[in-house]
Image: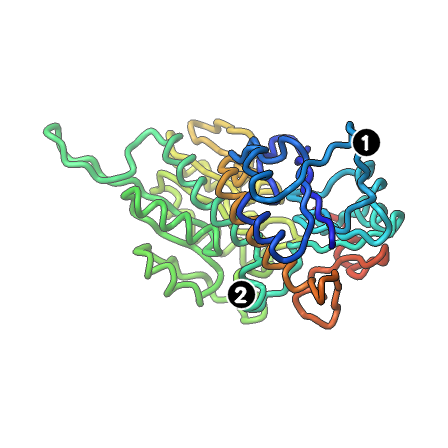
Amino acid sequence: MPKILVPIEVALGEARVAATPESVKKLVSLGFNVSIEKDAGVAAGFSDESFLNAGSHFFSEANGDSLKQFDVVLCVNSPGCDFLSKLKHGAILIGLLEPYGNQELAKSLTKYGLSALSLELLPRISRAQSADALSSQANIAGYKAVLLGANALDRFFPMLMTAAGTVQPAKVVVLGAGVAGLQAVATAKRLGAVVSVSDIRQAVKEQVESLGARFIEPPKLDDESSGKGVYAKQVSEDFLKTQRKQLLDQLSEADVVICTAQVPGKKAPRLIDEDMLDAMRPGSVVVDLAVSQGGNCAGTKPGETVLRNGVKLIGASDLPCTVPNHASALYARNLLALITPLISEGKLVLNTEDELIDGALISKDGEIRHTQVMNLGGF
């Protein structure tokens, strides 16, 4: 019977957990023996007792339990080198491992003979949708970004008819119409704002308009750069300059700007420069979801709110961690969808002929399979 461990997350500010009582029940029914580190789910609203009732066991190194007994480790963020050194050769690590340019992780996987599946590298195929953790977590980030913007804004979001007169609705501009951007649109519309959306992909216009927002037509762009899937590709600096000029008037009238444009493994495109910020009115708000990748907006800092000439610049990193219960529930289902195909006749099999597994498998028994990804120079 394969053994799974769900450790407590140690990254600063991380409140999510890689399993829930619901997912534990299903893992046990698949034939796994599941162990949870004590208090691993408390920050996400899942008690130790709820995990025990679902069929899991407790793990504690302090009680002499050994990490070498486990075949699989399910995590949100990659554990540190010390943790990985205690796993047995051939153990499988599954999570959001931040593989791009992560040479430290590559060294640990090689040194200790570990296999690893990184959810960031799942192929963009229909079979992978149920395991797509980037999308499930981006959905939460888009929702929470609008709430942050509404909370920081000096105005109401909806139009209000009062005895003292009419209050006009807030104007929200969303940059990027991927999963986070579309959720931001839907949330802002529910709060009563007037919403406009900018994206380099003409193909998302129908989705934007179906949510009741206005689509800002992008500058002309060749097909190779536009990207046809969920994630846009990197574009030229000349294109970005043209786009910034186009957005200048939009931002001068905006109350809230939600920045969501990101390219996996690349520096985030700079969509808002200093001149554009100068044109924004005091009291307006920019929420930058791409701040950890360099930021879509000039001047944003991860985890900080910067006041620039009266404009609030919110560096909104790790927003899924602020909604840990639902973020964990969705993430645990993503992991369950990915791990289910690994079971064959009661055994764990990393079938590299399976497109789903092959795309996400960054190492097998210590052999790095995505050397280009893990050797990137970073931002």
- Which residue is labeled 1 in the image? 64
- Residue 328, given in percent of the width and then of the height, sits at 54, 43
Q: Residue at x 30, y 44 (%)?
A: 193
Colouring used for the render:
rainbow
Q: Residues within 10 Å of mark 2 (few under 14, many from 20)?
A: few
How far apart in space, not on screen, are marks 1 and 2 (Cα)?
48 Å
Q: Residue at x 62, y 53 (%)?
A: 27
Position of 310 compared to 116: left or right?
left
Residue 63 vs 173, above or below: the answer is above
Q: Residue at x 56, y 47 (%)?
A: 270
Relative depth, front residue between 339 and 51: 51
Q: Which of the two discs, 1 and 2, sits closer to the camera?
A: 1
Q: Residues within 10 Å of mark 1 (few under 14, many from 20)?
A: few
> For the residue labelled by badge 1, is the local secondary structure a helix, a strand or a loop?
loop
**Is residue 203 at least partly visible in the picture?**
yes
Cβ–Cβ under 8 Å for marks 1 and 2? no
Can you tell which quarter of the image residue 132 is in? bottom right
Figure quadrant of the N terminus: bottom right
**Is residue 302 at least partly visible in the picture?**
no
Residue 21 vs 200, above or below: the answer is above
- Which residue is labeled 2 in the image? 229
Mark toward the start of the polypeptide (1 vs 2)? 1
Indicate the amino acid at tag 1: Gly
How many labels, in total?
A: 2
Relative depth, front residue between 234 and 120: 120
Indicate the amino acid at tag 2: Gly
- Residue 371, given in percent of the width and then of the height, sits at 80, 58
| Residue with the most extreme right position | 111
Can you tell which quarter of the image residue 77 is in? top right
